[in-house]
Image (spheres, rainbow, N blue to C red):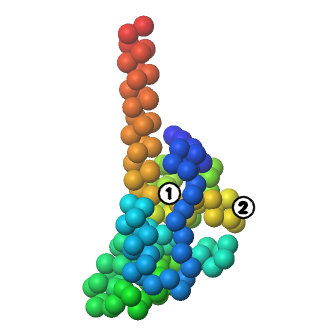
Amino acid sequence: MKSVSAVLRRKGATVASVPASTPVAEALEIMAEKNIGSVVVMDNDRYLGIMTERDYSRKVILKGRNSADTTVAEIMSADLPSVKPSDTIDHCMELMTTRNIRYMPVFDNNKLAGIISMSDVVKETILAQKETIDHLHSYIQS
């Protein structure tokens, strides 16, 4: 199974980030423009958390809050587990499934190296299975 670093190389390590004081409505606009489901909340170069669509729906919409008056710091998920570039995709799948989360920060020497999503994990798993099938198919034909 491949490592997190392979996923980051394939998809790129660039993350969409916003300051903690950003209104939720502005963060949602960024997410819509980039067709992504989360933004990283940063204080200069320091990681604070991740605001996801799930955070928005559960902590703003369901609670009747106003997305123009609520900041991302008020609703972000700050207690997510993190992984290292050397961790395996299987490890990510286990953490995400156990914790019922869709996004995790990737840290390399205490510096944010990227974000890995459940979608990334599923894509990588499918690619690995396809490679195995292709190898088996080649083996059978030879």
Q: Residue at x 67, y 72 (%)?
A: 45
Q: Nearer the viewer, residue 10 or 118?
A: 10
Q: Residue at x 69, y 66 (%)?
A: 110
Query: Is residue 93 shown left or right of residue 19?
Result: left
Residue neighbourhood size for the residue with mark 1, other residues' Cα within 10 Å, grouped as few (<14), some (14–19), many (≥20): many
Q: Name the mark on residue 27.
A: none
Query: Is residue 16 shown left or right of residue 110?
Result: left
**Image quarter in which the C terminus is found:** top left
Alpha carbon distance from label 1 to label 2: 17 Å
73 vs 93: above or below: below
131 vs 112: above or below: above
Q: Position of residue 4 (x, y in %)?
A: 56, 50
Seen from this angle, which residue lies furthest top?
Answer: 142
Residue 45 visible to the viewer: yes
* Rendered image quadrant of residue 48: bottom right
Q: Amino acid at mark 1?
A: Ile
Q: Position of residue 15 (x, y in %)?
A: 54, 62
Total labels: the figure holds 2
Q: Secondary structure at mark 2?
A: loop
Label 2 near label 1: C-beta < 8 Å?
Answer: no
Residue pointed to by mark 1? 116
Q: Position of residue 10 (x, y in %)?
A: 53, 44
Q: Amino acid at mark 2?
A: Asn
Q: Mark 1 vs mark 2: which is more N-terminal?
A: 2
Q: Secondary structure at mark 1?
A: strand
Q: Residue at x 41, y 56 (%)?
A: 118
Q: Position of residue 32 (x, y in %)?
A: 37, 66
Residue pointed to by mark 2? 109
